Amino acid sequence: MEVEIGRVTHFYSHLCVAVLQLKEPLKLGDKIHIRGHTTDFVQRVNSIEIEHRPAVWVKPGDDAAIKVIAPVREHDIVYRVVEESVEPHLA
């Protein structure tokens, strides 16, 4: 399952860093899916910065910069991949 959490507002190709405008919180370790006209990949968030300072999590309304594994474009949509826990069936 995926939940839309924001959009890409800028991409620094020389750094492979995307700036996201968020409407949901995001934290280190979250699995995200970035999708657009030519973009479609899933990655873990390993680095977040706000105003050039490292952050562990960001809240809605923040413009966060994250390192991405592939080029993205402005207006690409960012989703959080909600990983469902697998519970053993009781017999």
Image (cartoon, rainbow, N blue to C red):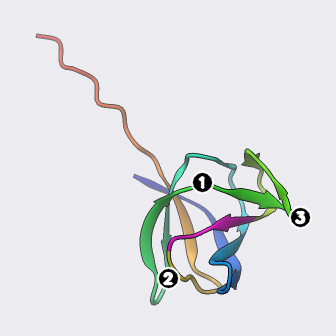
Residue 19 within the magenta-colored segment of the rendering:
no
Of the numbered discs 3 and 1, the one sitting upstream in the chain is: 1
Of mark 2 and mark 3, the one earlier in the sequence is 2
As helix, strand or loop, the secondary structure at mark 3 comes to loop
What's drawn in magenta, residue-wise?
65-69
For the point 60% across and 54% down, the residue is 46
Kindly indicate the quadrant of the structure image that contains residue 40. Answer: bottom left
The reply to whether callout 2 and callout 3 are in contact (CB within 8 Å) is no
Measure the C-alpha gap from mark 2 to mark 3.
Answer: 25 Å
Q: Marks 2 and 1: CB-CB under 8 Å?
A: no
- Identify the amino acid type marked 3: Glu
Relative image position of residue 61 (x, y in whole percent): 82, 60
In the figure, 50 relative to 84: above or below?
A: below
Q: Residue at x 43, y 64 (%)?
A: 42
Assign the C terminus to one quadrant of the image: top left
Q: Which residue is mark 1?
A: 46
Numbered disc 1: secondary structure = loop
The residue singled out by tag 3 in the image is 51
> How would you rate the neighbour count of disc 3 (Cα within 10 Å): few for under 14, some for 14-19, many for 20 or more?
few
The residue tagged 2 is 36
